[in-house]
Image (cartoon, rainbow, N blue to C red):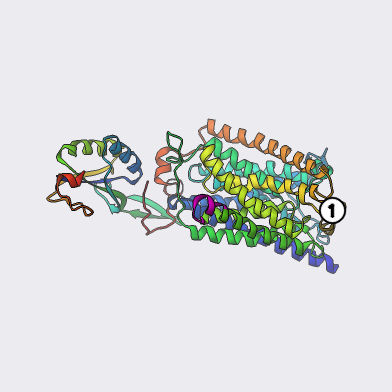
Amino acid sequence: MKLIIAMIQPHKLPDVKKELYKSEIYKMTVTNVLGAGQQKGYTETYRGVLTEVNLLKKVRLEIAVNEDFVEATIEAVKKGARTGKIGDGKIFVLDLLRCIRIRTGEEGVEAIG
Amino acid sequence: MELSTVLDTVWILVAAFLVFIMHAGFAMVEAGFTRAKNTVNILMKNFMNVSVGLLLFFLVGYGLMFGKSCRGFIGTDGFIIDIIDPYSTQNFAFWFFQAVFAATAATIVSGAVAERIKFYSYLIYCAVLTAVIYPVVGHWIWGGGWLSDIGMIDFAGSTVVHSVGGLSALAGAVILGPRLGKYNADGSSNAIPGHNIALSALGVFILWFGWFGFNPGSTLSASSPAVSTIAVNTAVAAAAGSLSAMIFVWIRYKKPDASMTLNGALAGLVSITAGCAVVSPVSAIIIGLLGGVLVSISIDLFDRKFHIDDPVGAVSVHGICGILGTLAVGFFAQEKYAALAGFEGTSGLLFGGGGGLLLVQFIGVISVAAWTLGTMFPLFLVMKKAKALRVSRDEELKGLDIEEHGMEAYGGFQIFQND
């Protein structure tokens, strides 16, 4: 079992969801985060003064998957989130030790679904 | 100066100030009903309505609206007014009152085209409306033009202001197309919830308050015996409108929805605007009740049936209810009230006046609709063809605040992306 964490551009979320749904991946958690990687920041103006904003709004997706869904998930996220510009984001794949469904108490592969 | 002139001037000015503050109302309603990432853009559009509107009305609009009439179709003098006889009630107070009305008509559209129109496109539209489209209609009905000649009654502007605004909004919304993610391939409609209903409620209260300048102020005279009745009619129509809209959605969707209730109050106000001086309070209540129900049905129809995306319901509140209000005069006008406002011998269908007035109102509705749609559809179409109308897909998703204005409305807050 793996936990896939992806940081993406917020305005690409609709596209990423569409790609995930196409691969039959529906279960996910979405949080709003601030962050930056190579895309160091951008400039805003306020009353004529330039401001550097260097922690940018991103969206973080967390998807817990069984082994056979790992590649499909990664491909879907890549396809949906890519714009070709710096700031597209990153995908992390973590090992998932245990997964429990609260309602039924199921564990492991059945719990991921 | 005569005391009556003094009082009239004070009254007209105060009423004009009340109409002016309606722009704050519009701004808050629209900001609340749209998403936080577009708030600066909405506020800028509303602000420019005032700036562009007042100035263009000064330069061009007033003359076209109230100038010496050319065959009842358009005014021909009175541009860039130097001074109007300051000792008459037709002094600058009158100009100012008319100017804020013009700006109000223009600002109706900003809600319907919200979240996807280019900012400079909106400025162009606003200029065209306040300079030409609106003044021509105003001339026909208030400036001594042909519609007033055949007896059309639109006391405070259900047609002149609200239908013109609402139908222009329709043209804009149709040509622009819906927001991304609003309609699905299977024809179903997604809700795009507003980000601050508190602001919207505040906006509706401010609009309702301002309407007490809009309607009673249109007597242009403090000594008119109709002023108080008009104020009462305005109040009860709004109350009835919000009540009937709330009950309607409560029954239909099982919950008293706040956004529809707010729209219902506005619908009641728009519906009574034409006839506020010529109907009884009971009639005003009925008209308000009808407006509240009609707006609820209309908003649903435009959204789910016709797939015309109108984020704040401007087309339904102002266009559809503006037409309702104008036609309602043909039914509900009563001689004993109309006489107080200077419309002696006026009666509607339900009070023994026959169908004559109703017919005239109908002619007014049709001709103004033809003029408005016939000029606004081409305007938006031309802009669309020139690729100067709608923002790009990325820009729409990122939000107009950052892309069009380079700033955020809620600096320091995290605006959730939850599509």
Majority secondary structure of magenta residues: helix
- Which residue type carries mark 1? Phe
What percent of the width, then of the height, locates residue B148?
Answer: 81, 45
Residue B203 visible in the picture: yes
Q: Callout 1 environment at 10 Å: few (<14), some (14 to 19), or many (20+)?
A: some
Q: Quadrant of the N terminus of chain A?
A: top left
Which residue is drawn at the image coordinates 29% and 39% (left, top)? A81
Residue furthest right as drawn: B345
Front-lying residue, B171 or B192: B192
Which residue is drawn at the image coordinates 42% and 57% (left, top)? B410
Vertical comparison of A83 with B90: above or below = above
Which residue is drawn at the image coordinates 77% and 48% (left, top)? B331
What percent of the width, then of the height, locates residue B337?
Answer: 81, 58
Front-lying residue, A88 or B287: B287
Residue B265 visible in the picture: no
Q: Quadrant of the C terminus of chain A?
A: top left
- Residue occupied by mark 1: B343
Q: Which region of the structure is painted magenta? A: B248-257
Front-lying residue, B360 or B246: B246
- Secondary-structure class at tag 1: loop
What percent of the width, then of the height, locates residue A28?
Answer: 27, 46
Q: Could you tell whether B11 is left or right of B308 in the image?
A: right
What percent of the width, then of the height, locates residue B389?
Answer: 52, 37
